[in-house]
Image (cartoon, helix red, strand yellow):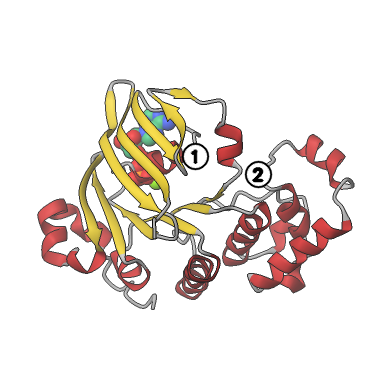
Amino acid sequence: MTTTVAIEVTDLSKSFKSKPALKNIFCTIKQGEMVAVVGASGSGKSTLLRHLNGLLSGDSGRVAIFGTALQTDGRNHSKIRSLRSQMGCIFQQFNLVNRLSVIENVLIGNLSRLSLVRSILHLFTKQEKLQALAALERVGILEQAYKRASMLSGGQQQRVAIARCLVQGAKIILADEPIASLDPESSRKVMELLVELNRENGITVVTSLHQIQVVRNYFNRTIALRTGKVMFDGATLELNNAKLQEIYGAATDELVMRGHSDIA
Ligand code: ADP
Ligand code: MG
């Protein structure tokens, strides 16, 4: 049986005003994997995820999605739109359109221009609306469907973002610190949902996190970044506290948060 490669990053580097943020990154993520990207603040987690969906262009190197190049040496390929449509994004800051209802947010996907959104909302078919409701049921917030997005808690808003990925038919979910602004209970629910979509729908999940306890609970594989370099890529089990100390030194404290081990 051959395993499909979902994401392939080859020698990717990126600097912001000559300050390196990613240094010669190589990584291969297979379809159906659930991978954590960890690192202290400023280590390049968000920058890496933004390169995976083409929100940022590298200075050099290549990103390919399901075998098709998305960007090479800073140049976006013509297929970028269709590749992007296979990837759903979840961000730390809940990026819903607050003035729209929950179901409208699910339907519009990643469209952000409100005027355009308003003009196309009535174009959605009954079937699409039913699909959106089914996705909201799947993430456990069907009863919130007609509330304004701004009325929802942070955890519920992240679940709307996940429902949006489902409706979009995403084969890959990129989540940038999706639980950083959530309480432990909401964090647990969001993480369990991502695990469920990975196991049951075969969605490839790449999530950046800075809490090593959460990583150990949910991810078999971890990529650890420090100042834009991959310092570790392997079984999370091997990333024990001694290994963390070796990689991060004093910054380990940022990853092993005291008193936050209650996210089970
Ligand atoms: P993390 O998500 O791990 O906290 P980031 O990817 O946000 O790290 O940042 C990595 C490095 O790149 C940091 O030094 C940060 O200051 C820098 N950086 C990120 N985005 C920008 C930007 N848009 N402009 C300038 N510097 C940036
Ligand atoms: Mg970040």
Secondary structure found at label 2: loop
Q: Position of residue 129 (x, y in %)?
A: 82, 59
228 sits to left or right of 162: left
Query: Which of the 4 image quadrants contains residue 133?
Result: bottom right
Query: On the rendering, which quadrant does ligand 1 occupy?
Result: top left
Give the residue pinned by disc 2. Answer: 110
Say if 4 sits above or below 183 in the image: above
User: Quick one: quadrant of the N terminus?
Assistant: bottom left
Q: Position of residue 100 (x, y in %)?
A: 77, 51
Mark 1 vs mark 2: in front: 1
Q: Position of residue 135 (x, y in %)?
A: 69, 65
Residue visible at 73% across and 71% down in the picture = 142
Residue furthest front as drawn: 1
Can residue 14 be seen in this snapshot?
A: yes
Residue visible at 16% across and 52% down in the picture = 248
Disc 2 residue crowd, few under 14, some 14–19, many 20+, Cα 10 Å = some
Q: Position of residue 74 (x, y in %)?
A: 41, 23
User: Quick one: quadrant of the C terminus?
Assistant: bottom left
The answer as to whether callout 1 falls within 8 Å of ligand 1 is: no
Disc 1 residue crowd, few under 14, some 14–19, many 20+, Cα 10 Å = many
Q: Nearer the viewer, residue 50 or 52?
A: 52
Say if 214 sits above or below 94 in the image: below
Q: Which of disc 2 and disc 1 is earlier in sequence? A: 1
Residue visible at 51% across and 54% down in the picture = 173
Numbered disc total: 2
Which residue type carries mark 2?
Answer: Asn
Can residue 147 be seen in this snapshot?
A: no
Say if 240 sits above or below 74 in the image: below
Give the residue pinned by disc 1. Answer: 53
Spatial separation of the CA atoms under disc 1 and disc 2: 13 Å
Secondary structure found at label 1: loop
241 sits to left or right of 67: left
